[in-house]
Image: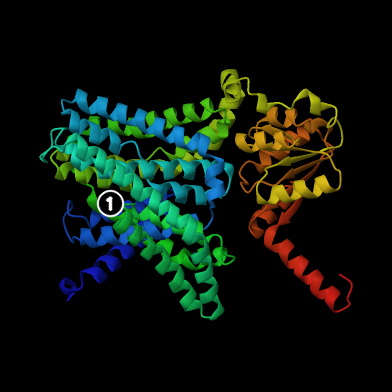
Amino acid sequence: MAQSIPLITTIATALGLALVLGFLAARSKIPVIVGYLLAGVLIGPHTPGFVADTEIAAELAEIGIMLLMFGVGLHFSLDDLLKVRTITVPGAVLQMAIATLLGTGLASAWGWNMGGALVFGLGLSVASTVVLLRALEARAALESMNGYITVGWVVVQDLAMVLVLVLLPPFAGWLGGNVLAASAEGLWQTLGVTLLKIAAFIGLMLVVGRKAFPWLLWQVARTGSRELFTLCVVAAAVSIAFAAARLFGVSFALGAFFAGMMMRESEFSRRAAEESLPLRDAFAVLFFVSIGMLIDPMILIDQPLRVLAVLGIVVVGTPLSAAALVLAFRYPLNTALTVAASLSQIGEFSFILAGLGVSMGLLPDEGQSLILAVALISIAINPLVFKAVEPLLTWIRARSRLARKLERPGDPLAELPMSTHEKFLSGQVVLVGYGRVGRRIAATLTDRGIPFVVAEQNRELVERLRSRGLAAVSGDASDPAVLIQAHIARASMLVVATSEIFNVRRIITIARTLNPAIETVVRTHSEEEARLLEQENIGKIFFGEGELAKSISRHALERYGRSP
């Protein structure tokens, strides 16, 4: 019976074993992802016993990637990505070039031909979008400035890899593969057509999608059917991703991401994200299981030194180069370490590229095995790398004067202009974060004539604020130098309006050290976070849903003539 229903057999076995091993991993205080990956290894073709259908598992994983990227798109707008384009575009391109050179050089040293070495290097240059997003979601950093930069970075990587996957077949003959070499005219034609398709897809999403998707959600929501609404969300994510891949040559992940961004224009975008969450989580588990199924554990025994060398590029070489690039663009050390941790793993695009390289006779089978093995290890340890970010940040700032200097090397945006000092010497509000909440707070303060200084990590945003005559400093507010530049010692109030709560305690501690009398105000997203912060005497806590409920209740009481 099981032989005739491979889809159900694969799903049942994968989810069941992932549950058991994920639970054991959690009880052992190690990331649950490790359990999911090991489940895949156990039901894969390289270990004895039951073997699940790898093709079905891979397709289920693709659905998971679509749903996850669609959900991420629901939290981002095009404006969010354009805010960070000056760092994500050159940063991602340079980081991919460095990682490719490292991987190509290592493979060449092993005696591989140039074509195989180049494909191998490219396979090590792109991070797993799924792993990166789950890590940011776990830290509640998806809608922070670090989240915008990291997601923008990986979107550029995805676009670059789409070009690589399209251009590799016509170049394979030139690189020594078993495919006939294309003419120079054919290569330019392929490149031109690919760029036109990508541009056409993005243009269609911006012109049509921005109006059509919100309208569609509104029409379905008017029916009052929750099932239809959920179906609409899932159908939009999967169908648009599929159409983007078939018609425009864009990856499933990228197509779903842009679809989500367009859906964000709807007032039901948050509900759409909530409705798709259970499916996203379930299929994300299948993604990790499918990775484990591809891995041959024998490579760890046969070639341990080569595995370590490749792992060094992925978890050391790439993160260091990314961190150096972020610092070179004069972003804070906190941002540099977050981007570095996010990119210290490889995933789905690496597998696709490796498979294509093997099929065209460019990449040896050993290269594919090394990429898969390093993917498993790097994904497994990525949560631990993220956990090390905060302690490492504190340790570096405390012990390295050079690091503190490099963080803002002569950056004019890290200091208030002399012309604004007199205006903000006393009694001002220090506003940390200028996102959707911070912007509204600043507008109210401006209308009432209350002076304030904005501390914001987005350098381009700081430039725009200064061009409008507002006082703003660029940097991470958890760095004492940033709060000092905002004149925290003479401020009357500190308002932390950023959505990232991990640095809140440090920001408050620094502010109270420099100004014991300062009043502190913090926003938070969950009731549990609010309760924990109140227990630690952080200051006045505003919980989003709680404040919304109070406003509605106050309006209802006033409507019935009762005193709020």
- Name the image quarter holding residue 94: top left
- Tell which of 342 and 303 is nearer to you: 342
Q: In the rendering, at what x and y percent does residue 222 appear? A: 56, 78
- Name the image quarter holding residue 409: top right
The residue at the point 49 percent across, 57 percent down is 207
Under mark 1, the amino acid is Gly
Above-or-below relation of 274 to 310: below
Camera sees residue 378: yes
| Mark 1, residue position | 292
Element carrying mark 1: helix
The residue at the point 77 percent across, 36 percent down is 512
Where's the C terminus, which quadrant? bottom right
The residue at the point 48 percent across, 43 percent down is 152
Q: How is the image coloured?
A: rainbow
- Tell which of 53 and 328 is nearer to you: 328
Q: On the rendered structure, is 8 left or right of 359?
A: right
Camera sees residue 162: no
- Tell which of 183 and 221 is nearer to you: 183
Q: In the rendering, at what x and y percent does residue 430 appear? A: 76, 39
- Name the image quarter holding residue 298: top left
